[in-house]
Amino acid sequence: MSPMSLLPLAGTTLVQPVADGWQLILAALSAIAVIVALITLVKVHPFLALIAGAFTVGAVAGVNILADPDTGTGVLPSFAAGFGSTAAGVGILIVLGAMFAKLLADSGGADQIVDTIVGHASPRMLPWAMALVGAIIGLPMFFEIGLVLLMPVIYLVARRSQLSLITVGIPALAGLSAMHGLVPPHPGPLVAIGALGADLGTTLALGVLVAVPTVVVAGPLFGRLAGQWVDVPAPSTFDADVRDEAGAVRRPSFAVTLFTVLLPVALMMGKAVADIAVDDKTQPVRRVLDLLGEPIFALSIALVVAMFTLGKSSGMDRAALSKVTGASLGPIAGILLIVAAGGGFKQVLVDTGLGTLLAEWADDANISVLLLAWVLAVLIRLATGSATVATITASSLMVGLVDGLSTGETSLVVLAVGAGSVFFSHVNDAGFWLVKEYFGLSVGQTIKSWSIMETVLSVSGLVFVLLLNLVI
């Protein structure tokens, strides 16, 4: 076994494979099989199954369980690093988002949004409306934040409209995921733009052209099929009525609720615009917008504002606000552990160098630049479970292949990478477990709905990129 080493490449680092290619592939497949078997057959909790999967990777790949005294590498250090970074980043956002979502629900704000949407859209149009909402929310937000914020709305729209939770939820997830992979100023596409030297404005325009039909196909159209395959009723988790002393329902207005929901979106969008428009990081405006738009800070501000616009306006006093925010933590404890363990398992795979190995294999293939960019991102996504790792690695490996391409063609390479980075989310992706737990699905149901939706979105994105390439 060779020690892990870091190879600098286009602003990122790639891990050298620790074993032969066949051994790493076998390690990944064995680990995934162990996880699925433990959860579906033995009924082991996903948190424990993911830990077992991480140990399986180490055992088959020949990586030390404990830290190697010479290199410091090992399964436990990798798992702990991935677990900690996921809990510190995504975990904090999930907690803040859960508190925000609970306020949105218990104040009646979510009901207000649902009543407005249901009142202005027929059952046939509701999935389309949810796709639009998901796309708007997902533009500047990390997927996890958008999902947490949208869950009360998804639950209630499904209950009030008598539609399957999957029929309503898949379009919203498609909107969130498409923005994550295809449209700047989301961090993923911005990383690829910087690595490949693409033009931001051109990529943004082409990204929207690709994202719109992609969301239509993977969202409302596929959601109708997925709702037949996986018919799951919406839970009553976010059902709430807030009444004053006279017994009348007290809710914040639709305008106030919409302002509150979009506040963190606007703050994060402001940061993204400032990062693009103001080059000097020391400019006061840039520094203020960077602070306000930091996801944790933006959600914290939104939570404080929601205590007044949603909580106080619905009649909650300080004790009630404390009770509501505290009550939001219990239901997400299991989700936090599973998502963090998913991050740990992903990091173990990353640190074996499997993603680097697959990227090198694809790089040697004789295929078109756009298809190669997509295949690279797909392979790394499947191996590591991370859209961000797939985007960074694939775009870095494509740097030498975009020389001589036009501005539009370079932007299409960025979009091909983005489309590939969201391909078939499965058990090594923290997002897979997040969707599974929030939607109350089994592993099989999650694969038949969420995982296939991601695949449809990825393939559709590639198809529309290739179609655009015919005229650019």
Image (tube, helix red, strand yellow):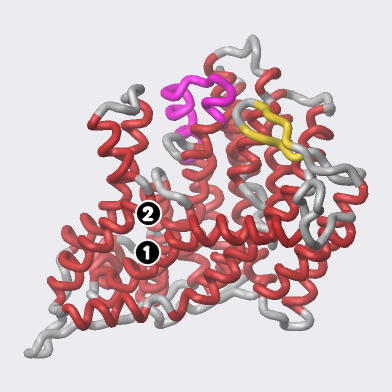
Q: x, y percentage for residue 423?
A: 65, 48
Is 204 a magenta residue? yes
In the figure, 446 relative to 283: above or below?
below
Which one is in front, 94 or 75? 75
As drawn, 382 above or below 109 = above
Which quadrant of the figure has residue 300?
bottom left
SS category of the residue bearing label 1: helix
Type of amino acid at the residue the image marks with label 1: Leu
Q: Residue at 86% across / 51% down in the picture?
A: 25
Name the mark on residue 296.
2
Return the residue found at the far front.
69
Q: Which residues are magenta?
A: 192-211
Q: Mark 1 near mark 2, Cβ–Cβ under 8 Å?
A: yes
Q: Main secondary structure of the magenta part?
A: helix
In the rendered image, the vertical position of residue 202 relative to residue 288, given as above or below: above
Q: Is residue 64 left or right of residue 154?
A: right
Q: Which residue is mark 1?
A: 96
The amino acid on which the numbered mark 2 sits, given as a three-letter code, is: Ile
